[in-house]
Every structure is written in C-alpha cells, then in structure tokens.
C-alpha cells in the first residue's frame, strides 16, 4: 500500500476494525518512511453486472457513480455519510441478489429512487427530477403530489 504523503511502499497496520455489517474492514496504517498515518478500507471485490445504458451502450457498474448521485441528491440535507454509504451497499446487494450479468440502467435508477424515498423525501424528489428528466414545473408538481399521496396513505395505515 503506497503512502498517500510520500509514496513509500512500506507501512504497518496499527489498528483494524470491522464495519457494523461486516462488509468493510477499516485499517489505520503508519508509513515506515515518513511516520504519517492514514486510513484504508477493504471490501470484498464482488463481480457486479454490466450496466446497459439508455443508448444501448454497456459499462461496468460503478459504485462511486451511484454514491456521487446520492450525495448530490442529499446535499444540504441532514443525512450522514454513513447512511449514504449504507444506501449504496443495499443497492449493490440488491443487484448481486438478482444474479444477472447485465442489467438495464433503469433497474438501478428505480432501486436508487426506492432507497431515497425511504431515506429522505427531498433527496428523492431531487434525484427524481434529474433521473426522470422533468421538463417543467408540472412534472415536478405531479411527483410531489404523488409523494404526498403516498405519505397520506401510510398515515392512514
């Protein structure tokens, strides 16, 4: 593991901790050259499906792309980085459970929307406005009305 400060290749592990769900190991390391400390995260490299884009192109699944979209939707909202990471992990688990080698981007987009709906309504509407390409205020308002209708149904249950 290369030191991010001096680029030296040798370091020692000072501390290791497993995440709550056991999917990630956090390691504190110390560079043997400059003695500065840094953190690494290890996760199992799992085979993710190829994503079939709307234009028919294919690209590998990119966890960071999903996380980036969720972070943008959750900007200035009271949502922790841990909650966003957990959301991305649930999306990855969902895709792995499907067991498909290729999946349309629409399946991933709908799963993100489902997760954001449960996480934060404002983040959900923000993501929906980009994902569903709202053309005008009418599209935006109909999504908000649908969201409010869902909330009312949940209150009555």
Image (tube, helix red, strand yellow):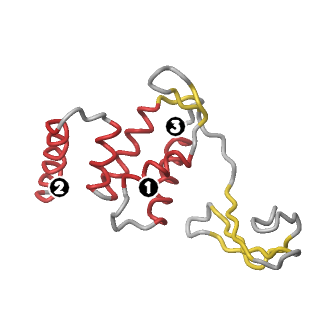
Say which residue appears at 52% left-offset and 41% top-offset. Answer: 95
Would residue 76 appear left or right of 47 to someone viewing this image? left
Would residue 16 appear left or right of 33 to someone viewing this image? left
Under circle 3, the secondary element is: helix
The residue beneath circle 2 is: 154
Q: Nearer the viewer, residue 153 or 54?
A: 54
Under circle 1, the secondary element is: helix
Q: Nearer the viewer, residue 35 or 111?
A: 35
Quadrant in which the N terminus appears: bottom right
The residue positioned farthest toward the front in the image shown: 6
Would residue 62 appear left or right of 29 to someone viewing this image? left
Residue 103 location, x and y as percent?
51, 30
Q: Residues within 10 Å of mark 2 (few under 14, many from 20)?
A: few
Residue 59 location, x and y as percent?
59, 31
Residue 114 location, x and y as percent?
34, 47
- Label 3 vs 2, first from the N-terminus: 3
User: What is the C-alpha distance between the residues marked 3 and 2?
Assistant: 28 Å
- Which label was assigned to residue 98? 3
Say which residue appears at 23% left-offset and 32% top-offset. Answer: 135
Q: Residues within 10 Å of mark 1 (few under 14, many from 20)?
A: some
- Which label was assigned to residue 71? 1
Quadrant in the picture for residue 11 = bottom right
Q: Is residue 85 above or below residue 107?
A: below
User: What is the C-alpha distance between the residues marked 3 and 1?
Assistant: 25 Å
Quadrant in the picture for residue 145 = top left
Task: Confirm or deny contact between disc 2 and disc 1 (CB under 8 A).
Answer: no
């Amino acid at each position: 593991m290369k030191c991010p400060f001096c680029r030296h290749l040798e370091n020692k592990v000072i501390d290791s901790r497993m995440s709550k769900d056991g999917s990630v190991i956090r390691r504190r390391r110390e560079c043997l050259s400059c003695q500065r400390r840094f953190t690494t995260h290890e996760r199992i490299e799992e085979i993710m499906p190829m994503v079939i884009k709307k234009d028919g192109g294919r690209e590998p699944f990119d966890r960071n792309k999903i996380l980036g979209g969720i972070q943008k939707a959750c900007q200035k909202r009271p949502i922790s980085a841990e909650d966003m990471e957990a959301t991305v992990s649930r999306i990855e688990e969902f895709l792995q459970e499907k067991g498909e080698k290729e999946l349309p981007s629409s399946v991933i987009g709908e799963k993100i929307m489902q997760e954001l709906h449960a996480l934060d309504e404002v983040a959900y509407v923000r993501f929906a406005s980009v994902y569903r390409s709202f053309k005008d205020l009418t599209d935006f308002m109909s999504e908000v009305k649908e969201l409010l209708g869902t909330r009312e149904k949940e209150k009555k249950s």
